[in-house]
Amino acid sequence: MIRQPKRSLPGWLRPMNRVVVALGRLGLSTGPVQVLTVPGRTTGEPRTTPVTPIEVDGRRFAVAALPRADWAQNARAAGHGELARGRRRTPVALEEVADPALRRRVLRAFPGQAGGGVPFFVRLGLVERGDADEFEAIADRVGVLEIRPRP
């Protein structure tokens, strides 16, 4: 049985995100984790967050465990941003995925491609074991954004 999501974020999340962003700015790779920068929806100021792009059928996606997280709302509002891996920066278009079947496929792939993110979903109470079946089952409760190259 899947527990109800907890209301608070883990205390380590913000400091860890800052470390990952700082390493990225120094040009250091952090495995599959990349840094997404999007304009803030209110201020227009650049906002950064670590993401682990998931690849399904040759397309890339970002998953927001909390669909109302600031980074996800900013990405939806802007529709574009910049994805950085080390010093390499790529302009990207961002769009919410509405297709339920595609959302399920992306979430099913999540534990295999972004295993480091599984404990976060467990901590939030979204999944218990973190297997592909559990992730597929929460596809309608999380945010899924497609990441496409932007000219």
Image (cartoon, rainbow, N blue to C red):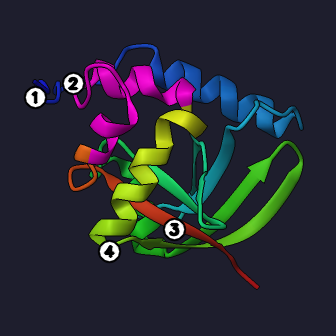
Question: Which label number is shown at residue 92?
Answer: none
Q: How many marks?
A: 4
CA–CA distance in space, label 4 to label 3: 11 Å
Q: Mark 1 and mark 2 in contact (Cβ < 8 Å)?
A: yes
Residue range of the region highlighted in magenta in the rendering: 115-136
Q: Which residue is labeled 2 in the image?
A: 125
Nearer-N-terminus badge (2/1): 1
Query: In which quadrant of the rendered view does residue 51 lie?
Result: top right
Local SS, label 3: strand
Q: Is residue 44 left or right of residue 101?
A: right
Query: In which quadrant of the rendered view does residue 23 lie?
Result: top right
CA–CA distance in space, label 2 to label 3: 24 Å
Residue type at mark 1 is Gln
Q: Mark 3 and mark 4 in contact (Cβ < 8 Å)?
A: no
Nearer-N-terminus badge (2/3): 2
Q: Which residue is labeled 4 in the image?
A: 99
Local SS, label 2: loop
Numbered disc in front, either 4 or 2? 4
Residue 101: where, in percent of width, then height?
32, 67
Work out whether residue 43 can be spotted: no
